[in-house]
Amino acid sequence: MKYQVKSVRMKHINRLKVVLVEKQKTGKWLAEQLGKDPATVSRWCSNSIQPSVETFAKIADLLNVDIKELFNSSK
């Protein structure tokens, strides 16, 4: 039996990369502030993986934005 695997494009859940650019900050800077590996932050920015809600809250504080600004609207 053959199975077809369809490519599923993951929606961009977070806007972290956009907000970092708007705030003139880098992923490396964010990684240092959070004590995380820069590769992990890079994966957050590319929406490969998502940080925890607690980490999103810390990111919002560091970037001085409302946490809602870090997410794309589902509308």
Image: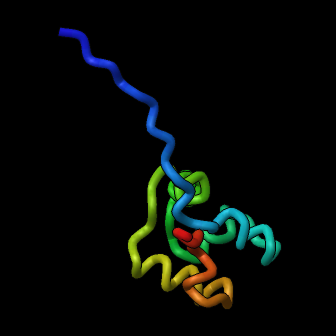
Q: Name the residue nearer the viewer: 14 or 2.
A: 2
Q: Name the residue nearer the viewer: 72 or 16.
A: 72
Estimate the x, y position of residue 72 in percent, counting from the top left: 59, 69
Q: Residue at coordinates 56% horizontally, 66% vertically from top-left? A: 14
- How many marks overall? 0
Q: Is residue 45 above or below residue 16?
A: above
Q: Residue at coordinates 78% horizontally, 68% vertically from top-left? A: 21
Q: Residue at coordinates 26% horizontally, 17% vertically from top-left? A: 3
Q: Is residue 50 above or below residue 33?
A: above
Estimate the x, y position of residue 45 in percent, counting from the top left: 60, 58
Horizontally, is 50 left or right of 69 in the view? Answer: left
Judged from this view, the residue extending furthest toward the top is 1
Please state, as top left, top right, bottom left or bottom right, where the C terminus lies in the image: bottom right
Occupied quadrant, residue 54: bottom left
Q: Name the residue nearer the viewer: 4 or 29.
A: 4
Occupied quadrant, residue 70: bottom right
Horizontally, is 5 left or right of 70 in the view? Answer: left
Judged from this view, the residue extending furthest toward the front is 75
Q: How are the residues colored? A: rainbow
Q: Name the residue nearer the viewer: 12 or 4.
A: 4
Estimate the x, y position of residue 67 in percent, counting from the top left: 55, 85
Q: Residue at coordinates 39% horizontally, 72% vertically from top-left? A: 52
Please state, as top left, top right, bottom left or bottom right, where the N terminus lies in the image: top left
